[in-house]
Amino acid sequence: MSFNVAFVGTGANPDEPSVDGFAMAYRHAAAYERLEDCRLVGCADIVRENAAAFAEEYDIPAEGVFEDYEEMLTAVEPDIVSICTPPATHANLVIGAAESGVVDAIHCEKPMALTWGGSRRMADVCEERGVKLTFNHMRRFGDPFRVAKRRLDDGVIGDLRRIEYAWGNFYDNGTHAVDMCNYFNDEHRAEWVIGQLDYETEDIRFGTHNENQILASWEYENGVHGMASTGPGADAVDSDWRLVGTDGFIDVYLTDRLAVQVYTVDPADCEELTFDKLASEASCIDLAVADVVQAVEEDRESELCARNALNATEIIFAGYESARRRGRVDLPLDIDDNPLEAMVESGDLSPAPADGD
């Protein structure tokens, strides 16, 4: 079986990534190129020069270069589409691609969408249309996380009781961080979330506001607790992720070094494992894209499926909603907007421009 692959949102120079754009389509394309059953056939970007440069890099023919993604879908009829645009555009683009009736699968960059309503709608439309929707939470394929999960499943720290993280923020990085918490807890859904945040200095990433600090707590349906402490509060957790069990804990490090430390009541089970890079066999994106393609070929659910992404996204937006309500939020979450964006728009939060703006 072979697949024609197209891209929406190529971005500009991939050698100069920033919070304005990472040109993630280049990384997606390199991952598809590694697979013998994938052929790159089209790309679209609202800046035609960007699309043309991308096409030249990946030998996409001139007739596969477009400014309008809908025209591209009609012309090249791809089986798989990677959407690599800013979060605020994800919902409309995913829904448009799914409703085109052309594609079998859509692999979208994270975070899911600007709003909780948009996140749900894109997942619902894809399910109704029989389109496999995945999100690029590729850190799941990193060796430190895989090793930590194996140790956890082996029972070296007993029963899992709590997952803590202090890496990044709660939305842009947080979509990875919370997704990893859910991965460690076997994708159980949360039952409630309570949180408070601080947003004094503007932090806009890919067009979207991100808080400066959050302290959030949640409980999963299986009784395991989650906690996020970011920004100036990151020192509350001694590692980037900590898995606390009845008989010990596991620390996972990603920021300053790549390592997993296991501490248990049995000294023979205590260990430290270090890693030269996040993924040894290939990049995490290579492994993620390979899983997406294989899931289409085998007609199965990918680890990166919309269902798993929704679990993480609901916790994130519920944390923001808790700050807005000043109280605990019971799930399922019954809002459509992005509470952080709404609080900025209403003036309830008034972050000062960042230095240099």
Image (cartoon, grey):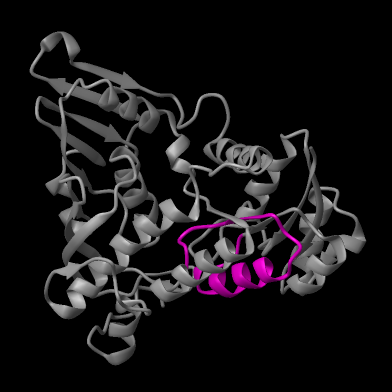
**Residue 30 quadrant:** top right
Up-down relation of residue 74 to residue 134 (above or below):
below
Residue at x-position 32% and y-position 40%: 186
Q: Does the magenta segment cover residue 250?
A: no
- As drawn, the residue found furthest toward the top would be 268
> How far across and how far down the image is residue 32, in percent?
70, 42
Q: Which quadrant is home to the N terminus?
A: top right
Residue at x-position 72% and y-position 69%: 45
Relative to 341, 190 lies left or right:
left
> How far across and how far down the image is residue 24, in percent?
60, 54
- As drawn, the residue found furthest toward the bottom would be 346
Q: Nearer the viewer, residue 137 or 155?
A: 155
Up-down relation of residue 159 to residue 177 (above or below):
above
Relative to 321, 257 lies left or right:
right
Residue at x-position 85% and y-position 61%: 76
Residue at x-position 63% and y-position 42%: 299
Up-down relation of residue 103 to residue 275 (above or below):
below
> How far across and how far down the image is residue 256, in percent?
32, 37
Q: Which quadrant is home to the C terminus?
A: bottom left
Relative to 352, 52 lies left or right:
right
| Bounds of the magenta segment | 84-113
**Residue 245 quadrant:** top left
> How far across and how far down the image is residue 307, in percent?
44, 54
Relative to 153, 63 lies left or right:
right
In this rendering, the count of numbered labels is 0
